[in-house]
Every structure is written in structure tokens, then in C-alpha cells.
Image (cartoon, helix red, strand yellow):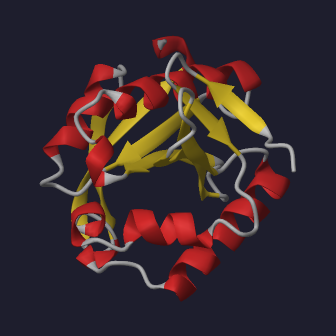
Amino acid sequence: MTEEVILETPRLRLVMWDAADAGLIMALHSTVGTTRYMSGGAPWNMEKCEERLANWIKEQARDGTTKYKLLSRGDRRFIGRAGISMHDRDENEFELGYALREEEWGKGYATEVASALAKWFFAEGFAGRFIAFTHPENFASQHVLKKIGMRQIAPRLIDGFVAPTFELGATDI
């Protein structure tokens, strides 16, 4: 089966998920380390991984964008997931999100992929802005968002906590 390449950076490749990729999502989100700032901190079970995979495939078909599988360009290892997907359909509001396997932290991948996704999103004309939010204690992710030029806006209540929220507009790049 030929992979649908969505976007490439110097070190990374974003590709569309395959229907059999729930095991990769499980490998990513089955640890406390990778879920401590999301999903109430609970590792995902296989049912949730299969549900998210099905949703990402549906989002891509419906919206033309979703959270994608993130691979290393060099050795094709699974790095994590990243993308911009619809957050609020009524407001036509999109949200940047990413999650990397713990062994891939600290290598600059989050900044590299987030920056590339922002440029791609605006070049494709999905919308004139997008948002991102983080857990209040996820300082590393907040740093990435600021580094790619996002500015902090009013926080939002997400999953029961007040989440620092950021936005980036097409004219900000």
C-alpha cells in the first residue's frame, strides 16, 4: 500500500493513517508520560486508540486535515502524531495538536513539525487562523507554540482545567 504523504520537513514525514495503525497509537498513548497533560492523565486503552484512529480518518475525508502519523524521514520510525484539525465546527475553528513518543522528546521535532504544519495550513487555505491549547503545567509545549509565533489569548476550559490558549493567523507567518 502506498502511503499518502501530507507534508515533509527536513527530518520528518506526515502521512495519513492506515486502518491497521491502532497499535502505533497505543504505543504512543499507553504511558502516563505521554498522557499526563491530556485525557485526564490516563493512558489510552485499545478501544480509545481505535476510536481516535477512526475519527482521524473521518476528519481527513470530511475536512481535508486531521492529526497525522509522524515518521522519521531517515529510518521511517514512528515518532508520534501531529496535525491541525477542526476544533469547533460552528466557529470554523481549527486546532494544532501533537504528541511525541517519550524517546523522541528533546530533539526539536515538535517545533519542526508545528512550524511546517502552520505554513502548510495557511498555504492550503483551510482558514485564516488556528488555535492550540495546553495543560497549564505543560511548559515545553507552551514554549513550542510561542517559538512558532503563536500568541497567547484568553484561556479556555478544556477537560476540566483552565488551559493556556494560543492563536496564529495567516498574516503572522
135 left or right of 158? left
Foreground residue among 158 and 134: 134
Query: Where is residue 102 shown, x and y percent of the image?
Result: 27, 52
Q: Residue at x 52, y 84 (%)?
A: 46
Tell me if residue 87 comes above or below residue 76 in the rendering. Answer: below
Q: Nearer the viewer, residue 1 or 29?
A: 1
Report x, y in % for residue 8. 63, 24
- The answer to which quarter of the image holds residue 109 is top left
Q: Residue at x 23, y 57 (%)?
A: 135
Q: Position of 37 compared to 80: left or right?
A: left
Q: In the rendered view, tell whether residue 103 sits above or below residue 128.
A: below
Total number of numbered discs in the rendering:
0
Q: Residue furthest front?
A: 75
Dividing the picture into quarters, in which one does residue 151 lie?
A: top left
The relative height of residue 57 versus residue 22 in the rendered view (above or below) is above
Give left or right: position of 89 versus 71: right
> What x and y, as percent, mark residue 30?
36, 74
Q: Quadrant of residue 142?
A: top left
Q: Considering depth in this image, is 110 or 134 the residue closer to the camera?
A: 110
At 55% from the left and 40% from the top, the residue drawn is 71
| Residue 43: x %, y % from top left | 33, 78
Residue plotted at (47% across, 72% down): 26
